[in-house]
Image (cartoon, grey):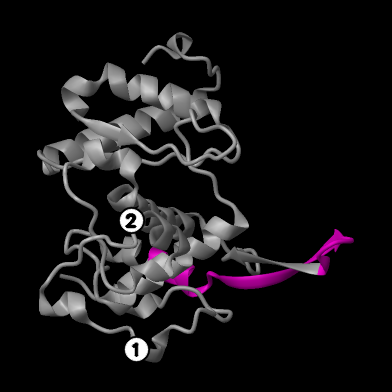
């Protein structure tokens, strides 16, 4: 791939584009008719997303159809998603709802090391009060993080974003043409604020599993712990 075709000049950034292309090509070989939905976090380097779109378009012969998500309020034309304290809270809500209704599990092909890495990071992902110097909010501020004691949370955050934005893709009208199906959510997912706003009357599956009640497992207050990682240890 020619780095001069893109606005970037960093070989490291070019590597990200190459890796994404290979990953999408692998997905297409495995899931021939799947809708590929690409969510690029734009918090740190938004121009990378534009270059990714260009590279994906130039390789449609091996990648096929794909959809970029546009989830930045300040820059609606940018093909990125933005992580904020509010959206991070919504990520956790969405995953907890999926976990409690048995809709998230490991595929048999996921190797044990990858499973353990994700479960380990999710287990440490929690609401963390940190010292800040803010005359409005006070001397502490809460953030969702797994970077406690020097630990990493990149895999956990990526997974949370994948779950959340897959849900948004299924309910937001602006993606209706790409998903080729009516809105669908599982019971309980209207607890996610954005879903409740976008699709209050979204379709529900009629099978018994979809009627699973969340009962008192949810209080609108997540407390201090994040996703229930042990449920992910199941596989199907």
Residue 232: image location, x then y, percent = 31, 73
Residue 64 position in % (x across, y down)? 18, 28
**Quarter location, residue 57:** top left
Indicate the quadrant where residue 9 lies: top right
Q: What number is the disc on residue 215? A: 1
Q: Which mark is residue 35?
A: none
Residue 60 x, y percent position in the rendering? 22, 22
Tell whether 7 sits left or right of 39: right
Residue in the foreground of this view, choosing between 24 and 172: 172
Q: Residue at x 17, y 20 (%)?
A: 61
Q: Residues within 10 Å of mark 2 (few under 14, many from 20)?
A: many
Residue named by callout 2: 167
Residue 61 part of the magenta-drawn span: no
**The residue tagged with tag 2: helix, strand or loop?**
helix
Residue at (53%, 59%) from the top-left corner? Answer: 88
Front residue of 181 and 30:
181
Report the residue that reaches farthest toward the front. Answer: 201
Q: Quadrant of the C terminus?
A: bottom left
Q: What residue do we see at 32% from left, 66% from top?
A: 115
Question: Is residue 128 found left or right of 76 in the rendered image?
Answer: right
Highlighted range, magenta: 118-139
Q: Find the distance from the CA under tag 1 to the CA under tag 2.
A: 22 Å
């Amino acid at each position: 791939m020619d780095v001069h075709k893109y606005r970037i000049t960093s070989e490291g950034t070019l590597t990200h584009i190459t890796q994404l292309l290979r990953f999408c090509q692998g997905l297409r070989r495995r899931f021939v008719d799947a809708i590929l939905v690409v969510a690029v976090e734009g918090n740190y380097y938004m121009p990378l997303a534009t270059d990714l779109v260009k590279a994906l378009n130039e390789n449609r012969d091996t990648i096929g159809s794909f959809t970029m998500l546009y989830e930045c309020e300040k820059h609606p034309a940018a093909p990125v998603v933005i992580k904020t304290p509010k959206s991070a809270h919504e990520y956790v809500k969405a995953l907890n709802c999926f976990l409690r209704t048995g809709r998230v599990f490991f595929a048999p092909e996921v190797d044990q090391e990858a499973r353990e890495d994700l479960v380990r990071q999710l287990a440490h992902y929690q609401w963390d009060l940190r010292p800040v110097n803010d005359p409005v909010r006070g001397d502490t501020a809460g953030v969702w993080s797994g970077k406690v004691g020097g630990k990493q949370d990149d895999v956990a955050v990526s997974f949370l974003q994948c779950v959340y934005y897959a849900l948004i893709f299924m309910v937001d009208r602006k993606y209706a043409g790409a998903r080729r199906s009516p809105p669908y959510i599982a019971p309980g997912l209207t607890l996610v604020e954005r879903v409740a706003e976008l699709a209050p009357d979204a379709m529900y599956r009629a099978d018994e599993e979809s009627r699973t009640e969340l009962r008192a497992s949810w209080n609108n207050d997540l407390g201090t712990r994040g996703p229930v990682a042990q449920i992910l240890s199941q596989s199907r």
